[in-house]
Amino acid sequence: MTQAMRDFLRERNIHEVECVIADMTGIARGKILPKDLFLSEGEMRLPKSVLLNTVNGEQPNNTPYTGVTDPDMICVPDLATLRQVPWAAENVALVIHDCQNFDGTPVGLSPRAVLRKVLQLYAARGWQPVVAPEMEFYLVARSSNPHEPLVPPLGRSGKTESGRQSYSIDAVNDFDPFFLELSSFCKLHGLGVETLIHEAGAGQMEINFTHGDALELADRVFLFKRAVRETALRHGIFATFMAKPMETEPGSAMHIHQSVLDTETGKNIFSNDDGSASALFFHYIAGLEKYTAPATLLLAPHVNSYRRLSRFMSAPTNVRWGYDNRTCGIRVPNSTPVNRRLENRVPGVDVNPYLAMAATLACGYLGMVEQLTASAPTADSAEHVHNELPRNLEDAIQRLRECKALGEVLGELFVQAFCEVKELEFATYSRVISSWEREHLMLLV
C-alpha cells in the first residue's frame, strides 16, 4: 500500500473502502472493507468466475475459462482511481482494482485488462489513443412493476414533459435540484464532466466528458453511471442507461470520439504536417468499416440494445462514414487539423465502457496495421443502408465468434467467455412470454 493512499484515507478520515472491479456486464463487484483491514491486506481476492455473471446473475459453465476448481484472482488497487464517495452517509472511499493471476499476469477475462491489452498494442507502435465519450440517459418516474412501461418523471413544475424537448434549457431547469447535486457529486468524485444538454427524448439527457486517456475515461464512465443512479434515487426518481427504455422515444447512445497521438511528438497522427488528412486516418476509418459489425456485441451487448439500432430513430444501422453526417455510423466532425477525429455512433449507453473503448480502438488499430482502404464518404443520407450491423443479440454473438482478428487483439479466451455469457443471457430472455404475445395471441390464434 503506497504512502499516498494512506495519506488520502487519513486526511479525509475515511472509515470504509469500497474495493470494486467491473464484470463483463459492467456491474460493480467487490467488497467493502474497514479502512484498517484495507490497509493491512493491501489487495482483495475474488473468484475469477465473478467476472462471468450475466446481467440477471447467472453464470455459464466457467470451467473452460477459470478451471475446474473455480480459483481466486488477486485484485490490486489502482491508486489513480482512488476517490471519496460523495453521496455516502459516512466518509467512504472507492478504488478500482486490476485483476491479476498469482504470477502477476493480468486476468484476460477482466474488461479492464482487455482495454489495457489494446492500449499496449497501440503503445508498442508509438501511438496513444485519445477518446471523449458522450453519454445519453433517461430520467424516469419510480416504479416497482417491471411490466409497466417507463414514463418521464414529474419535474419541479409538477408536470411531465408532454413532447420532445431537444436542447431545451427550460426542460433541464425543471430538474435543477437533481442536476445541481449531480454536478457537485461529479466534481467531488473527479469525473471531469464537461457539458449537459437535454436530448431528443422526453426526460432524456446527455453528458459530455473532456477528452483524455481511454482507460481513465472508461473508469470515469463506469463511476458516472453509479453517480447518476444514486443521485436520482435521492431525488425520488430513477435514472436508466438502457439503450431503448421507452417504445416511442429515441434510444440512448454512448458516442465515442477518438483520435490518436504520436507518443514522441504529441501530434495527431490523423493529420499531415500540411493540415490534410493522413493515410492513417483513412486506414483507421476503414478498420471501423470492416470490424464494427463483428464487434457489435461489445457495442450493443443486450437484447434491448437492438431495439435502439433501428431506422429513423436517431441511431445508426450502418458502418458508412461521412463528414458531419449523423446518418452514418462513423461521423467525422468539423475540426481543425490538430483536433481531427472521428465519432463512432454505434455504441449504446448500456455498454461496459471498458469493452466498448477496447472494441472501437481495436477496430481502428486493425485498420491501421492492415492498411485497409476506406470507402468514399457518404455525402447524403445513409438511412437507407440498414443491413450492415447485426439485427439481434444472437446474430451479434455469431459475428464476434467468427472474427479471428478481433479475437487476437482482444484475447481469444475473453471473446469465447463473453459470447458464452451473452448466449446464456439470450437463452434466459427467450423463455420470457411478453405482454405483446398475451395481448395479441392468447385469444386470437
Image (cartoon, rainbow, N blue to C red):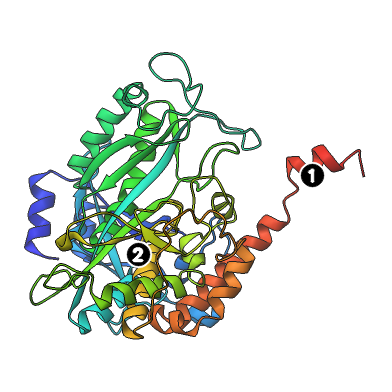
Under mark 2, the amino acid is Met
Q: Position of residue 348 (x, y in %)?
A: 46, 53
What label sits on residue 19 in the rendered view?
Answer: none
Instruction: Please state if 282 lies on the left or on the right of 155 as rendered.
Output: left
Please name the residue shown 87% across and 41% down the image.
442
Closer to us: 7 or 360 = 360
Under mark 1, the amino acid is Glu
Q: Position of residue 387 (x, y in %)?
A: 60, 64
Q: In terms of secondary structure, where does tag 1 sit?
A: helix
Q: Is residue 61 visible?
A: no
Kindly identify which residue carries mark 1: 437
Please name the residue shown 21% across and 51% down the image.
210
Instruction: Name the image quarter holding residue 409.
Output: bottom left
Q: In terms of secondary structure, where does tag 2 sit?
A: helix
Q: Pick the quarter of the image with the C terminus.
A: top right
Residue 302 to residue 235: above or below: below
Q: Residue furthest top?
A: 158
Closer to us: 229 or 441 = 441
Q: Are marks 1 and 2 in contact (CB under 8 Å)?
A: no
Residue 274 to residue 342: above or below: below
Instruction: Please state if 185 lies on the left or on the right of 244 as rendered.
Output: left
CA–CA distance between discs 1 and 2?
Answer: 37 Å
Q: Pick the quarter of the image with the N terminus.
A: bottom left
Mark 1 surroundings within 10 Å by alpha-carbon count, few (fewer than 14), some (14 through 19), many (20 or more): few
What label sits on residue 357 in the rendered view?
Answer: 2
Label located before the other in sequence (1 or 2): 2
Instruction: Name the image quarter holding residue 264.
Output: bottom left
